[in-house]
Amino acid sequence: MKQINVGIIGCGSITRFRHAPEYRANPYVNDIFFYDNNTSRATALAQQFNGRVVDKVEELFNNPNIVAISDCSSNESHHINSTKALLHGKHVLCEKPMATSVEKARVILEAQKKSGKKLMIDHNQRLTKVHQRAKSIIENKELGKALTFKTTFGHQGPEKWSVDGTNATWFFKKERSHSGVAGDLGIHKIDLIHYLLDDEIDIVHSFTGALDKVDESGTPIEVCDNVVCAMKTKRGRLGTASFSWTYYGSEDNSTTIYFEKGMMKIYHHDQYPLIIEMKDGSVVKHELEPMQTNDNQTNSGVIDAFVDCIINDKVPLITGEDALASLIVIEKILNDK
Ligand SMILES: NC(=O)c1ccc[n+]([C@@H]2O[C@H](COP(=O)([O-])OP(=O)(O)OC[C@H]3O[C@@H](n4cnc5c(N)ncnc54)[C@H](O)[C@@H]3O)[C@@H](O)[C@H]2O)c1
C-alpha cells in the first residue's frame, strides 16, 4: 500500500487533539515529523504519537520524503509557512483562518497555483455527519428554497484551549490573531452557510466588541470577543449570526435554516442534532453523532479527506478559493464600523 510521510508545523492544541492522532490513525501515513518554535512541544508530541522531531522548519521543506505539511501555526504565520511549503512542492493542509488578511490569503493561493500541489483549509465543520446530512436534505429539495438563516458559534474562549493555557495567548493579540473570535469561530459558520446553501454572503452589517476578555496585564483584549451581524447572500437570502468567546456555560454551535416548506434545526438538541419541521406540522428527528467540542474530540474527518485527495489525486473538499470567500466575509465583518 502506498504510504506518505507528513510534516506538522506548530505543535499546540489543534495538532495534539486532531492532526497528530488523525494522521497516526490513517493507514496511508507512515512517518510524522513535528516542528514547533518551542522544541519541547514538538518533542512531547513526537513521543506521544511515535513521530520524529525537526529543529528547523527548513528540514521539513527540504526533505524530499515529506509529501504533505499541516500548517498548525498561529494565524499570523500561515501565509509564510503554507506558501513556502507549497513552493517546496508539498501538499498543504492549512488551519483556519487561512490568513490574517485577504491579501495574504491570495499569496498562498498564488503559490498553490504555481506549484500545482493540493491546498486544503481546515474548515472541518462541513464534514460532521450532521452537516453532511443537512447538505443532502437541502440538495434533495424536499424543503424547497432556503429563505433565511440564523447561526451561532460560541464557547468560553480560547485561553484554556490554547497550549499556552493563559490569557497571554496569541489568540488575544491583534498582530497574531488579527480577527479575534470572528476568525476563530465565526469563519467556521460563514464557511458552513456558504457550503450548505451553495451561496456566498455578500453584504454584512456587524457589531464587534471586546466586552469581557482581558490580557495578561488585565487590559481588555485588542481583538473582538463578540460579534453580532446581519447578512445578505448573493442569492438574496437573509441571515443573522453571532460569535462569542463569552458564552460562559455550554458551547453553542447551532444553526437554523428556514425554507419555503419548513425548517431545519442543527445542533439544538443533544440526542437529535438534526431536526426537520415541515409546514404541515410533521417532524423528523435525526439521531446522529454529537458535535465535536473542545471537550469532546472525535475524528474530524479532515485529515482522512486531505490524505485521500493526495493519494487518489482528487480536488480537496475545502479549497483555498472556498476559504478565501469566507475570509472576505470576515474582513467585511471587521471593517463595518
Ligand atoms: N479547525 C479548527 O477547528 C481549529 C481549532 C482550533 C485552532 N485552530 C487553528 O489552528 C491554529 C493553531 O491553533 P492552536 O489552537 O493549536 O494554538 P496553540 O496556541 O495551542 O498552539 C500554537 C502552536 O504553534 C506554535 N507556533 C506558532 N507560530 C509558529 C511558527 N511560525 N512556527 C512553528 N510553530 C509555531 C506555537 O509555539 C504553539 O505551540 C490556529 O490558526 C487556529 O486558528 C483550528
Image (cartoon, helix red, strand yellow):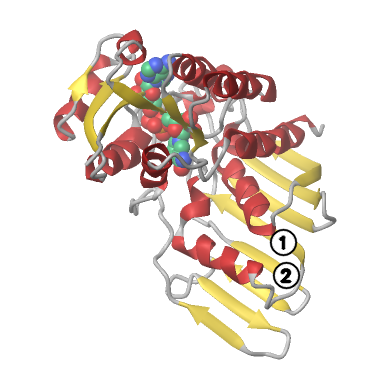
Please state the quadrant of the image where ligand 1 appears. Answer: top left
Residue visible at 70% across and 76% down? 143
Kind of element beneath mark 2? strand
Q: Nearer the viewer, residue 179 or 27?
A: 27
Asked if disc 1 and disc 2 are in contact, CB closer than 8 Å, the reply is yes
Residue 9 figure quarter? top left
From the viewer's perspective, is residue 245 above or below residue 255?
Answer: above
Three-letter code for the amino acid on which mark 1 is drawn: Phe
From the viewer's perspective, is residue 239 above or below residue 161?
Answer: below
Q: Is residue 10 left or right of residue 195?
A: left
Q: Residues within 10 Å of mark 1 (few under 14, many from 20)?
A: many
Q: Is residue 90 left or right of residue 50?
A: right
Q: Which residue position is annotated with label 1? A: 149
Q: Which residue position is annotated with label 2? A: 258
Q: Position of residue 176 (x, y in %)?
A: 53, 20
Q: Position of residue 29 (x, y in %)?
A: 25, 37
Residue 50 figure quarter? top left
